[in-house]
Image (cartoon, rainbow, N blue to C red):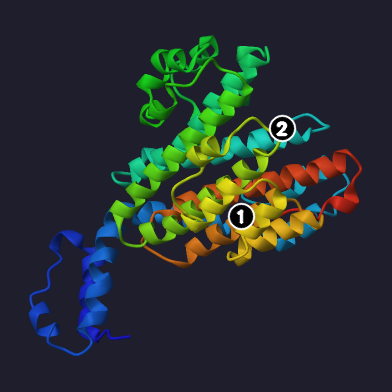
Amino acid sequence: KGFNHFLVDRLLHCFLNPTTCYFPDLHKLEEQKNTRYITMSAGNMLSYNLKDGFLEAIVRGHRNGILKAADYANLTQCDSVDDMKMHLSLTDYGNFLQNEPSPIPPSVIAEKATEKLVQDFEYLQKNCVEPLYTFLEYIRYGYMIDNAILLITGTLHGRDTGELIEKCHPLGLFDNMATLCAATTVRDLYQLVIVDTPLAPYFTDCLSSDDLDELNIEIIRNTIYKAYLEDFLEYCKKMGNGTDEVMSEIIAFEADRRAINITMNSFGTDITRDEREKLLPTLGRLYPEGITKLVRADDQEAVKAALEPYNEYRQMVNDSSYGEKSLEDAFFEYETKLNRLSFEKQFHYGIFYSWIKLKEQEIRNLVWIAECISQDQKHRMNQFVQIF
């Protein structure tokens, strides 16, 4: 709408020959009635495609390779994990399980599928430029936080360091990770390892904590993640265009999910209301009115009352109460919906984040189906989150 033949020819010329692109008659077009439709998208399209158009095309190709309903219909008819292997070989996964002996445990499917995801992600990051490179780094930060907490918690329970590192997510690996296991206080943790990582700014509010124990570790995890989400949101807002719009909604949901989970998991613990308030994110749809009500909540009924104005969240909590599905599954379904919708827009970095999250949900689905087959629970095989 609003494009004439002259401008279409010029835009096509600019897209194919960006170094010689010019608009000598643009001042004439600005006097025309429909110019407002032209100026909104021409600059964004040209500059975005020059730097990131190739990588966006790759990600959209990966998106098209995500398993569809027909694939899941075939997978749920499998009688063994080997049958799953045969069907997956016909998809974008290819022969990722070809060297695995039978019977294949579900954990191997998760490991190999994650390896393929990491390889695709690293290809994108090695071929991108700023600001996309930093955006992809922010995605890694979330996995770094999870890995750090995993190592500390495992060490607290006397687990072997090598075994713990094997369980860490490959996207969250960083130098000197094993040194985390030697820390006994938060200050040691910070000075030995964290100070040299991108996570250092997120630890500043945790340095006053006492010795590491299970409760303090959970407090540290949520405090760090709160700072991370706030920082990630600020970065996305600076980028403008469509990235801030798409990512603001996704990050807001992540903040709300953590706020609800933190509140419900704090019941029956030694965490006070003041401590809970410090852990809840200061962003999202629930902030500030809903967060204030969650801080005051003492039981699940109070949580339901706090979520009453928020239709989606209220329905999720109600469904979990009636046993229709777990709250975690309800959150996964809504997250999948948001990430699926981000592909409906163009010229933004949100699709890189959404693609990773959709692939992670796909891996969870594959593991669920494989577990149901292995444990002879085939009547539960369809209880996964449909993506497309």
The answer to whether one can see residue 195 in this image is: yes
Q: Residue at x 13, y 82 (%)?
A: 30
Is mark 1 in CB contact (under 8 Å) with mark 2?
Answer: no
331 and 20: which is toward the camera:
331
The answer to whether one can see residue 89 in this image is: no
Three-letter amino acid code of the residue under disc 2: Val
Among the 4 quarters of the image, the one containing residue 301: bottom right
Mark 1 vs mark 2: which is more N-terminal? 1
Residue found at the far bottom of this picture: 33
> Could you say whether the residue bearing mark 1 is in a helix, strand or loop?
loop
- Residue 15 location, x and y as percent? 26, 65
Q: Residue at x 23, y 87 (%)?
A: 34
- Residue 193 location, x and y as percent? 42, 17
- Report crowding for label 2: few under 14, some 14 to 19, many 20 or more residues within 10 A (C-alpha): few
Q: Is residue 105 above or below residue 214?
A: below
Residue indicated by mark 2: 108
27 and 213: which is toward the camera:
213
- Residue 35 location, x and y as percent? 20, 83
**Residue 114: mark:** none
Q: Quadrant where the C terminus lies?
A: bottom right
- Residue 57 location, x and y as percent? 43, 57
Q: CA distance from mark 1 to mark 2?
A: 19 Å
> Could you say whether the residue bearing mark 2 is in a helix, strand or loop?
helix
Q: Is residue 183 above or below residue 326?
A: above
65 and 347: which is toward the camera:
347
**Residue 66: mark:** 1
In the picture provided, is 238 more to the left or to the right than 206? left
In the picture provided, is 78 more to the left or to the right than 194? right
Q: Quadrant where the N terminus lies?
A: bottom left
Three-letter amino acid code of the residue under disc 1: Ile
Q: Residue at x 38, y 24 (%)?
A: 197
